[in-house]
Amino acid sequence: MGYKHSATRLVLFMDHPLGLVPFIHKVQELLCIVAPLWPAIVSLHAELQSDSDATGEAAAELASKFATILPSVTKLYVNAEVEDNLCKVFASTLINCYAPQLAHCECYIMLDSVDAQFSTDLKNVVVRLDDEAETSATSMHPESITHFYIAGSIQRTVDHLFSADTRDAIEFTNLEQLCILSPVDEDSDNKFSFEQLAFPKLSVLRTNPSNQAKHFLNSAQFPDHLDKLELLTLHIGTIALYNIKFGTKQREQLATFIDDEERVEFWSMANYLFGTFELCTYSVFTLGHLDDMPSIDNIAWDFLVKLEIIPTVESSLLLELIPRLRNTKEIVVHSLEFSMAGSWPQEKPSNGSLEILRLNYTVTDMSNLCVMALLVRLLPGLPSIEELFMPAVPPEFYSFVDEY
């Protein structure tokens, strides 16, 4: 019986063949064997799997029963490896039951019905709404939310989750972090005005290039400065800018590049963000794909501070790239492939700002020879280098360093 009084968190992971309804039924049965109520549990974390054989009514009934067995839950996390209609019904019912008392609502399952009045204590929100979600009686309080994650349409989410009496001007008075992942090609509704949205205390904004993001940046009300702006794409990578100027001029310029995920527009945006003097104090470019990378001559990243390359990159490209990054302090290469020395640039690379170089590659006798040839070519032109990371130290390295 001691568990009833000491347990404050229930975590459910479906990692066995039981379907959603049988699994939840079994969990509730075991809980009730110990005690009919667990008032000390304030956090419910559920990782679900689909169950196509059960009915939505059964899933909704079990979700409602949790509110009886666990009456004190204020923190809710719900996710699914593969979501189906049953997961949607279960998650929607669970949120509707707990909404009046939640301080933390994190749901990555698309909701098909939310019709609850949320607590004024709600601070952290992650939500995905189905296109046809029923939300007629739903109301969240924008002034209480400090962290908001929208996966889907900005317009639809705001329209459905915030009551009509605040619709003229919705001010997220205390919102500090906002993440918006909108459909790339979804058009904006002319009846919806982004100008009604205000974020006076926003410090961190994460978004993906999309048509809605363009209108959002152009029209919503923001501070003139952000601690962090992060731009996320599926096809190229992530841009992170710290201590960034975010006034009207900067936002309007950014909006000209951000209306979709076209490769040409993205690389133009990268040149603007990493090529503008004093736009921010620290910047990171994490490259996830190199397929559409422009030629070296079309790269203008004079003020990029850190470059991280995740896909395999050839040593010849690295040797071409390093001299172009005039103020870059750190380069991280996750997978280096050694090209023939004959394909390397004729001119030896030089970079007076680079302080940290991390090179990861598969260690073999051949790669040891290749990396030594690369270092002999590279290091004399890096006078500011302080840290060099490699998965193994070639035998000839120490004699080279002594001479170098």
Image (cartoon, grey):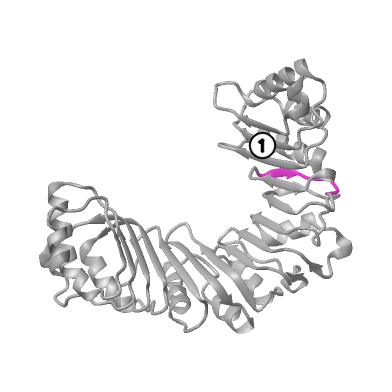
Most foreground residue, 314 or 176: 176
Residue for point 78% across, 42% down:
74
Q: Is residue 114 magenta-colored? A: yes
Q: Say if residue 333 shows up in the picture.
A: yes
Residue for point 57% across, 65% down:
210
**Residue highlighted by disc 1:** 45
Specify whether 252 is left or right of 289. right
What span is colored magenta in the figure? 110-118
The residue type indicated by label 1 comes to His
Specify whether 392 is left or right of 170. left
Quadrant position of residue 5: top right
Quadrant position of residue 268: bottom left
Check the image and report above or below for 30 versus 262: above
Q: Position of residue 326 (x, y in %)?
A: 34, 79
Residue for point 89% across, 63% down:
165
Q: Position of residue 99 (x, y in %)?
A: 81, 44
Q: Is residue 154 magenta-colored? A: no
Residue for point 66% across, 39% down:
78
Specify whether 119 is left or right of 403. right
For this orientation, the residue located farthest to the right is: 165
For this orientation, the residue located farthest to the front is: 402
Most foreground residue, 43 or 16: 43
